[in-house]
Image: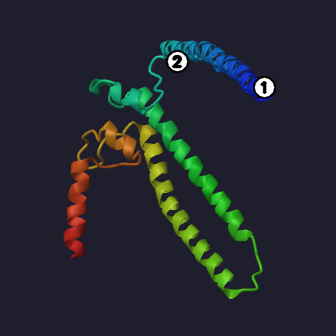
């Protein structure tokens, strides 16, 4: 029985060692704040670099929020025109890349033993072609918008000559009509469609 009494004493000795192991996570906790401090410093440096870049290139718009923060008197200034031009060119490039991928995909000739597999692939190809057809129409509008940027008429309604507005242009960069003129067109279409 004396040996049994010694065993519990040895377990208490190991219990005292466990708190020391628990002390190690505290050390890792103390190491974490310097990492977050480094991240904070890195973010501050990045923010300052962005501010310096904007100061160096006046009129350079970095995002939609910068565009919306500009005063109304600056509507369709050269910086805004350049922003929308780059946005439209990016859209155009994406559409052209998608068209290339579709062309390559449609050139692939797979032989299917099962007619259901063939039907599924043909249906997918038809859906893909419909999407590309819509993108082809959008590509014409993008080209038209780029031409209007070059001649300085971009951002103004083709019917009334009023400003279309930055929020509408951000939502739909190819917009040619103001909201009022677009609503009028939609009412007329609905009237004649019925």
Location of residue 11 by image quarter: top right
Picture coordinates of residue 126 (x, y %)? 57, 74
**Badge 2: few (under 14), some or many (20 or more) residues near its Cα, within 10 Å?**
few
Point out which mark residue 50 bears: 2
Picture coordinates of residue 138 (x, y %)? 47, 56
Instruction: From the image, state whether disc 2 or disc 1 is nearer to you.
Output: 1
Q: Residue at x 58, y 49 (%)?
A: 94
Total of numbered circles in the picture?
2
Residue 44 vertical position relative to residue 86 in the rendered view, above or below? above
Point out which mark residue 107 bears: none
Picture coordinates of residue 52 (x, y %)? 52, 12
**Residue at mark 2 to residue at mark 1: CA–CA distance:** 75 Å
Q: Is residue 13 left or right of residue 129?
A: right
Q: Is residue 69 left or right of residue 5?
A: left
Q: Which residue is mark 1?
A: 2
Q: Residue at x 41, y 33 (%)?
A: 64
* Secondary-structure class at tag 2: helix
Quadrant containing the C terminus in the rendered view: bottom left
Q: How is the image coloured?
A: rainbow
Q: Is residue 48 left or right of residue 162?
A: right
* Secondary-structure class at tag 1: helix
Q: Residue at x 41, y 30 (%)?
A: 80
Q: Give 18 or 183, whichever is nearer the viewer.
A: 18
Residue 3 vertical position relative to residue 151 in the rendered view, above or below? above
Location of residue 67 by image quarter: top left
């Amino acid at each position: 029985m004396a040996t049994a009494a010694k065993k519990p004493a040895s377990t208490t000795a190991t219990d005292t060692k466990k708190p020391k192991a628990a002390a190690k996570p505290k050390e890792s906790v103390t190491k974490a704040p310097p990492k977050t401090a480094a991240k904070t410093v890195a973010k501050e440096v990045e923010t300052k670099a962005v501010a310096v870049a904007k100061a160096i290139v006046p009129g350079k718009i970095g995002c939609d929020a910068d565009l919306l923060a500009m005063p109304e008197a600056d509507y369709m200034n050269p910086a805004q025109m350049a922003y929308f031009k780059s946005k439209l060119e990016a859209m155009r490039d994406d559409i052209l890349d998608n068209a290339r991928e579709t062309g390559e995909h449609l050139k692939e000739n797979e032989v299917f033993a099962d007619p259901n597999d063939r039907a599924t692939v043909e249906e997918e190809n038809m859906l893909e072609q419909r999407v590309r057809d819509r993108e082809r129409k959008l590509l014409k509008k993008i080209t038209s918008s780029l031409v209007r940027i070059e001649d300085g008429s971009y951002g103004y309604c083709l019917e009334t000559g009023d400003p279309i507005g930055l929020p509408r242009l951000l939502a739909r960069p190819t917009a040619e009509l103001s909201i009022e003129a677009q609503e009028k067109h939609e009412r007329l279409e609905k009237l004649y469609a019925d």
